[in-house]
Amino acid sequence: MEFPSRLKKLALLGGAACTAIGGVVLWKDTIAGKKVDTLKSEKEMEKEVAGKVFVVTGANSGIGKEIVRELARKKGRVYMACRNMNKCEEVRSEIVLETRNKFVYCRKCDLASFSSIREFAKNFMVKESKLDVLINNAGVMKCRKMLTEDGLEAQLGVNHMGPFLLSHLLHPALKAANTSRIINLINLDYRKGVINIADLNSESNYDTSKAFYQSQLASMLVLPEIAEKWKQDGISVTAVYPGVCATDIKRHMGVDKSITGNIIANPLLWFLTKSAERGAQTPLLVATDTNIELSGGLYSNLKPLDVDSVALDKELAKKIMAVSLYWTGLMDKADLVKS
Protein backbone atom coordinates (compact mmCIF):
# COMPACT_ATOMS: atom_id res chain seq x y z
CA MET A 1 0.00 0.00 0.00
CA GLU A 2 2.95 2.34 0.68
CA PHE A 3 4.37 2.08 -2.85
CA PRO A 4 1.17 3.21 -4.67
CA SER A 5 0.86 6.04 -2.14
CA ARG A 6 4.34 7.28 -3.03
CA LEU A 7 3.50 7.07 -6.73
CA LYS A 8 0.40 9.13 -6.12
CA LYS A 9 2.42 11.79 -4.31
CA LEU A 10 4.99 11.85 -7.11
CA ALA A 11 2.20 12.17 -9.67
CA LEU A 12 0.69 15.08 -7.75
CA LEU A 13 4.09 16.79 -7.46
CA GLY A 14 4.72 16.24 -11.16
CA GLY A 15 1.34 17.70 -12.04
CA ALA A 16 1.97 20.72 -9.84
CA ALA A 17 5.40 21.23 -11.43
CA CYS A 18 3.94 21.02 -14.94
CA THR A 19 1.24 23.52 -13.99
CA ALA A 20 3.84 25.89 -12.55
CA ILE A 21 6.03 25.60 -15.64
CA GLY A 22 3.02 26.18 -17.88
CA GLY A 23 2.12 29.25 -15.85
CA VAL A 24 5.65 30.64 -16.21
CA VAL A 25 5.58 30.05 -19.98
CA LEU A 26 2.22 31.83 -20.30
CA TRP A 27 3.48 34.69 -18.13
CA LYS A 28 6.62 35.12 -20.25
CA ASP A 29 4.54 35.00 -23.43
CA THR A 30 2.24 37.72 -22.06
CA ILE A 31 5.21 39.90 -21.06
CA ALA A 32 6.82 39.36 -24.48
CA GLY A 33 3.85 40.70 -26.42
CA LYS A 34 2.62 39.73 -29.88
CA LYS A 35 4.79 38.84 -32.85
CA VAL A 36 4.46 40.42 -36.28
CA ASP A 37 3.33 37.10 -37.74
CA THR A 38 0.11 37.37 -35.71
CA LEU A 39 -0.83 40.37 -37.86
CA LYS A 40 0.22 39.17 -41.31
CA SER A 41 1.36 36.09 -43.19
CA GLU A 42 4.95 35.16 -44.01
CA LYS A 43 4.20 35.82 -47.68
CA GLU A 44 2.92 39.34 -46.94
CA MET A 45 5.98 40.09 -44.80
CA GLU A 46 8.36 38.83 -47.46
CA LYS A 47 6.67 41.01 -50.10
CA GLU A 48 7.35 44.08 -47.93
CA VAL A 49 11.03 43.21 -47.42
CA ALA A 50 12.37 41.34 -50.46
CA GLY A 51 14.86 43.34 -52.52
CA LYS A 52 14.81 46.40 -50.25
CA VAL A 53 17.99 47.86 -48.74
CA PHE A 54 18.35 48.10 -44.97
CA VAL A 55 20.99 49.49 -42.61
CA VAL A 56 20.92 48.29 -38.99
CA THR A 57 23.32 49.74 -36.41
CA GLY A 58 24.46 47.64 -33.46
CA ALA A 59 23.58 44.58 -35.52
CA ASN A 60 25.94 42.02 -34.01
CA SER A 61 23.94 41.28 -30.85
CA GLY A 62 20.58 41.59 -29.14
CA ILE A 63 17.68 43.25 -30.91
CA GLY A 64 19.83 44.40 -33.84
CA LYS A 65 20.95 40.84 -34.56
CA GLU A 66 17.36 39.56 -34.48
CA ILE A 67 16.22 42.35 -36.81
CA VAL A 68 18.94 41.45 -39.31
CA ARG A 69 18.10 37.75 -39.05
CA GLU A 70 14.43 38.36 -39.86
CA LEU A 71 15.14 40.82 -42.69
CA ALA A 72 17.61 38.35 -44.21
CA ARG A 73 15.07 35.55 -43.88
CA LYS A 74 12.60 37.69 -45.86
CA LYS A 75 15.18 38.28 -48.61
CA GLY A 76 16.18 41.82 -47.69
CA ARG A 77 19.55 43.33 -48.59
CA VAL A 78 21.01 44.16 -45.18
CA TYR A 79 24.02 46.18 -44.04
CA MET A 80 25.19 45.42 -40.50
CA ALA A 81 26.75 48.67 -39.22
CA CYS A 82 28.90 47.66 -36.25
CA ARG A 83 31.84 48.78 -34.14
CA ASN A 84 33.28 45.29 -33.52
CA MET A 85 34.02 43.80 -36.93
CA ASN A 86 35.16 40.40 -35.65
CA LYS A 87 31.85 39.88 -33.86
CA CYS A 88 29.98 41.28 -36.85
CA GLU A 89 31.57 38.81 -39.28
CA GLU A 90 30.86 35.95 -36.89
CA VAL A 91 27.17 36.87 -36.63
CA ARG A 92 26.90 37.57 -40.35
CA SER A 93 28.22 34.09 -41.18
CA GLU A 94 25.68 32.56 -38.79
CA ILE A 95 22.78 34.48 -40.35
CA VAL A 96 23.85 33.85 -43.96
CA LEU A 97 24.13 30.10 -43.33
CA GLU A 98 20.77 30.02 -41.57
CA THR A 99 18.81 32.16 -44.05
CA ARG A 100 20.75 31.32 -47.24
CA ASN A 101 20.76 35.02 -48.03
CA LYS A 102 24.21 36.11 -49.20
CA PHE A 103 23.16 39.77 -49.39
CA VAL A 104 24.07 40.49 -45.77
CA TYR A 105 27.13 42.70 -45.33
CA CYS A 106 29.36 43.81 -42.45
CA ARG A 107 30.50 47.41 -42.41
CA LYS A 108 32.48 49.34 -39.84
CA CYS A 109 30.48 52.09 -38.13
CA ASP A 110 31.41 53.29 -34.66
CA LEU A 111 28.79 55.73 -33.38
CA ALA A 112 31.35 57.12 -30.93
CA SER A 113 33.38 58.44 -33.88
CA PHE A 114 32.12 61.02 -36.38
CA SER A 115 34.90 60.07 -38.78
CA SER A 116 33.81 56.41 -38.67
CA ILE A 117 30.19 57.41 -39.33
CA ARG A 118 31.23 59.61 -42.25
CA GLU A 119 33.38 56.84 -43.71
CA PHE A 120 30.51 54.34 -43.45
CA ALA A 121 28.07 56.74 -45.14
CA LYS A 122 30.52 57.57 -47.93
CA ASN A 123 31.23 53.89 -48.68
CA PHE A 124 27.53 53.00 -48.53
CA MET A 125 26.64 55.69 -51.06
CA VAL A 126 29.27 54.33 -53.44
CA LYS A 127 27.85 50.82 -53.14
CA GLU A 128 24.10 51.55 -53.12
CA SER A 129 21.98 54.03 -55.05
CA LYS A 130 19.19 54.05 -52.45
CA LEU A 131 18.34 53.14 -48.86
CA ASP A 132 14.84 51.97 -47.97
CA VAL A 133 15.18 51.71 -44.19
CA LEU A 134 17.69 52.91 -41.61
CA ILE A 135 17.29 51.34 -38.16
CA ASN A 136 19.20 53.26 -35.48
CA ASN A 137 19.40 50.47 -32.92
CA ALA A 138 22.85 50.81 -31.32
CA GLY A 139 23.18 52.53 -27.97
CA VAL A 140 24.83 52.64 -24.57
CA MET A 141 23.06 52.79 -21.21
CA LYS A 142 24.13 54.22 -17.85
CA CYS A 143 27.86 53.84 -18.34
CA ARG A 144 30.64 55.48 -16.35
CA LYS A 145 31.73 58.86 -17.65
CA MET A 146 33.43 58.37 -20.99
CA LEU A 147 34.05 60.61 -23.98
CA THR A 148 33.62 59.84 -27.65
CA GLU A 149 36.44 60.34 -30.13
CA ASP A 150 35.08 63.85 -30.71
CA GLY A 151 34.97 64.79 -27.02
CA LEU A 152 31.26 64.28 -26.40
CA GLU A 153 29.84 62.61 -23.31
CA ALA A 154 29.42 59.01 -24.48
CA GLN A 155 25.70 58.53 -23.90
CA LEU A 156 24.77 61.79 -25.62
CA GLY A 157 27.28 61.05 -28.38
CA VAL A 158 26.35 57.43 -29.11
CA ASN A 159 22.61 57.56 -28.41
CA HIS A 160 21.79 60.88 -30.03
CA MET A 161 24.57 62.67 -31.93
CA GLY A 162 25.84 59.55 -33.73
CA PRO A 163 22.44 58.44 -35.11
CA PHE A 164 21.58 62.08 -35.86
CA LEU A 165 24.69 62.46 -38.02
CA LEU A 166 24.25 59.06 -39.70
CA SER A 167 20.63 59.84 -40.60
CA HIS A 168 21.59 63.17 -42.14
CA LEU A 169 24.51 61.75 -44.11
CA LEU A 170 22.30 58.99 -45.53
CA HIS A 171 19.53 61.44 -46.41
CA PRO A 172 20.35 61.43 -50.17
CA ALA A 173 20.08 57.62 -50.32
CA LEU A 174 16.85 57.66 -48.29
CA LYS A 175 15.41 60.33 -50.59
CA ALA A 176 16.39 58.30 -53.65
CA ALA A 177 14.19 55.43 -52.45
CA ASN A 178 11.12 57.70 -52.87
CA THR A 179 9.42 56.12 -49.86
CA SER A 180 11.82 55.33 -47.04
CA ARG A 181 11.97 55.12 -43.26
CA ILE A 182 14.16 55.87 -40.31
CA ILE A 183 13.49 53.90 -37.14
CA ASN A 184 15.02 55.19 -33.89
CA LEU A 185 14.96 52.78 -30.98
CA ILE A 186 14.20 54.72 -27.82
CA ASN A 187 13.82 54.06 -24.10
CA LEU A 188 10.76 55.40 -22.28
CA ASP A 189 13.13 56.91 -19.73
CA TYR A 190 13.14 59.93 -22.06
CA ARG A 191 10.16 60.95 -19.90
CA LYS A 192 12.56 61.44 -16.98
CA GLY A 193 14.93 63.51 -19.07
CA VAL A 194 15.96 67.10 -18.44
CA ILE A 195 17.97 68.98 -21.04
CA ASN A 196 20.73 70.91 -19.31
CA ILE A 197 21.57 73.45 -22.02
CA ALA A 198 24.16 75.12 -19.79
CA ASP A 199 26.04 71.83 -19.33
CA LEU A 200 24.77 69.63 -22.15
CA ASN A 201 28.03 67.70 -22.35
CA SER A 202 28.00 66.98 -18.58
CA GLU A 203 31.39 68.63 -18.09
CA SER A 204 30.62 70.25 -14.72
CA ASN A 205 28.53 67.44 -13.29
CA TYR A 206 28.00 63.87 -14.44
CA ASP A 207 25.25 61.54 -13.29
CA THR A 208 25.09 58.27 -15.22
CA SER A 209 21.28 58.01 -15.12
CA LYS A 210 20.58 61.68 -15.84
CA ALA A 211 22.97 61.59 -18.80
CA PHE A 212 21.14 58.58 -20.23
CA TYR A 213 17.71 60.19 -19.77
CA GLN A 214 18.98 63.38 -21.41
CA SER A 215 20.30 61.45 -24.43
CA GLN A 216 16.91 59.79 -24.92
CA LEU A 217 14.98 63.04 -24.58
CA ALA A 218 17.30 64.80 -27.04
CA SER A 219 16.47 62.17 -29.68
CA MET A 220 12.75 62.42 -29.01
CA LEU A 221 12.75 66.22 -29.15
CA VAL A 222 14.30 66.45 -32.64
CA LEU A 223 12.29 63.55 -34.07
CA PRO A 224 9.13 65.49 -35.08
CA GLU A 225 11.28 68.37 -36.39
CA ILE A 226 13.21 66.04 -38.71
CA ALA A 227 10.05 64.14 -39.65
CA GLU A 228 8.28 67.33 -40.73
CA LYS A 229 11.30 68.61 -42.65
CA TRP A 230 11.90 65.36 -44.54
CA LYS A 231 8.27 64.50 -45.23
CA GLN A 232 8.54 66.24 -48.61
CA ASP A 233 11.35 63.82 -49.51
CA GLY A 234 9.22 60.75 -48.80
CA ILE A 235 11.14 59.92 -45.61
CA SER A 236 9.26 58.99 -42.44
CA VAL A 237 10.98 59.10 -39.04
CA THR A 238 9.52 57.06 -36.19
CA ALA A 239 10.63 56.17 -32.67
CA VAL A 240 10.14 52.64 -31.33
CA TYR A 241 10.24 51.43 -27.74
CA PRO A 242 11.06 47.68 -27.89
CA GLY A 243 10.22 47.00 -24.24
CA VAL A 244 12.44 45.78 -21.41
CA CYS A 245 14.61 43.18 -23.13
CA ALA A 246 17.30 40.75 -22.02
CA THR A 247 20.18 42.21 -24.04
CA ASP A 248 23.65 43.52 -23.26
CA ILE A 249 22.49 47.17 -23.34
CA LYS A 250 22.64 47.03 -19.53
CA ARG A 251 26.21 45.71 -19.49
CA HIS A 252 27.48 48.84 -17.73
CA MET A 253 24.90 48.65 -14.95
CA GLY A 254 25.50 47.21 -11.49
CA VAL A 255 23.08 44.32 -11.96
CA ASP A 256 25.41 42.79 -14.55
CA LYS A 257 28.66 43.70 -12.84
CA SER A 258 28.09 42.29 -9.35
CA ILE A 259 27.96 38.73 -8.04
CA THR A 260 24.66 39.48 -6.29
CA GLY A 261 23.18 40.84 -9.50
CA ASN A 262 24.14 37.81 -11.55
CA ILE A 263 23.04 35.25 -8.94
CA ILE A 264 19.88 36.89 -7.57
CA ALA A 265 18.71 39.92 -9.58
CA ASN A 266 19.13 38.59 -13.13
CA PRO A 267 17.10 35.38 -12.52
CA LEU A 268 14.31 37.54 -11.07
CA LEU A 269 14.50 39.99 -13.98
CA TRP A 270 14.14 37.06 -16.38
CA PHE A 271 10.45 36.90 -15.45
CA LEU A 272 9.95 40.55 -16.37
CA THR A 273 11.94 40.87 -19.60
CA LYS A 274 11.41 40.08 -23.26
CA SER A 275 13.83 38.10 -25.36
CA ALA A 276 15.78 40.01 -28.01
CA GLU A 277 13.73 38.20 -30.66
CA ARG A 278 10.48 39.56 -29.19
CA GLY A 279 12.00 42.99 -28.70
CA ALA A 280 12.69 43.09 -32.43
CA GLN A 281 9.03 42.68 -33.38
CA THR A 282 7.87 46.31 -33.21
CA PRO A 283 10.96 47.71 -34.98
CA LEU A 284 10.39 45.12 -37.72
CA LEU A 285 6.73 46.05 -38.07
CA VAL A 286 7.39 49.79 -38.26
CA ALA A 287 10.30 49.26 -40.66
CA THR A 288 8.33 47.15 -43.12
CA ASP A 289 4.55 47.55 -42.83
CA THR A 290 3.39 49.73 -45.73
CA ASN A 291 0.21 50.71 -43.85
CA ILE A 292 2.03 52.47 -41.00
CA GLU A 293 2.04 56.26 -41.27
CA LEU A 294 3.21 57.60 -37.93
CA SER A 295 6.13 59.78 -38.89
CA GLY A 296 7.25 61.85 -35.92
CA GLY A 297 5.51 59.53 -33.44
CA LEU A 298 6.23 56.59 -31.18
CA TYR A 299 5.38 52.89 -31.45
CA SER A 300 5.47 50.08 -28.87
CA ASN A 301 3.96 46.58 -28.69
CA LEU A 302 2.99 46.79 -32.38
CA LYS A 303 0.81 49.89 -31.90
CA PRO A 304 1.10 53.67 -31.48
CA LEU A 305 2.02 55.07 -28.07
CA ASP A 306 1.37 58.65 -26.97
CA VAL A 307 4.45 60.86 -26.77
CA ASP A 308 4.92 62.45 -23.35
CA SER A 309 4.57 66.24 -23.21
CA VAL A 310 8.21 66.60 -22.10
CA ALA A 311 9.24 65.75 -25.68
CA LEU A 312 6.81 68.19 -27.30
CA ASP A 313 8.56 71.43 -26.30
CA LYS A 314 9.13 73.04 -29.71
CA GLU A 315 11.43 75.80 -28.47
CA LEU A 316 13.66 73.31 -26.69
CA ALA A 317 13.56 71.07 -29.77
CA LYS A 318 14.90 73.95 -31.91
CA LYS A 319 17.77 74.49 -29.49
CA ILE A 320 18.72 70.78 -29.48
CA MET A 321 18.39 70.68 -33.26
CA ALA A 322 20.76 73.64 -33.61
CA VAL A 323 23.32 72.20 -31.18
CA SER A 324 23.14 68.79 -32.89
CA LEU A 325 23.72 70.29 -36.34
CA TYR A 326 26.66 72.31 -35.04
CA TRP A 327 28.34 69.65 -32.90
CA THR A 328 28.13 67.02 -35.65
CA GLY A 329 29.65 69.45 -38.17
CA LEU A 330 26.59 69.46 -40.42
CA MET A 331 26.30 73.24 -40.12
CA ASP A 332 28.65 76.00 -39.05
CA LYS A 333 27.73 78.99 -36.87
CA ALA A 334 27.16 81.32 -39.81
CA ASP A 335 24.68 78.94 -41.46
CA LEU A 336 22.89 78.36 -38.15
CA VAL A 337 22.44 82.10 -37.67
CA LYS A 338 21.01 82.42 -41.19
CA SER A 339 18.60 79.54 -40.69
Image: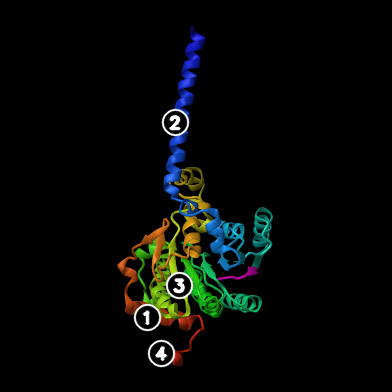
Q: Quadrant of residue 231?
A: bottom left
Task: State the separation of the CA atoms marked 3 and 1.
Answer: 19 Å
Badge 1 density bin: few <14, some 14–19, many ≥20, Cα 10 Å = some
The residue where tag 1 is placed is: 318
* Mark nearer the viewer, 3 or 1: 3
The x and y percentages for residue 338 are 41, 93
Judged left or right of residue 160, residue 65 is right
Kindly identify the residue that appears in the image at 58 percent across and 62 percent down. Answer: 59
The x and y percentages for residue 200 are 41, 75
The kind of residue on which mark 1 rests is Lys
Task: State the separation of the CA atoms marked 2 and 1.
Answer: 55 Å
The residue where tag 3 is placed is: 236
Is residue 335 shown to the viewer in this render? yes
Foreground of the two, 226 or 231:
231
The kind of residue on which mark 4 rests is Ser
Task: State the separation of the CA atoms marked 1 and 4.
Answer: 11 Å
Q: Are marks 1 and 4 in contact (CB under 8 Å)?
A: no
Q: Are marks 3 and 1 in contact (CB under 8 Å)?
A: no
Kindly identify the residue that appears in the image at 39 percent across and 65 percent down. Answer: 298
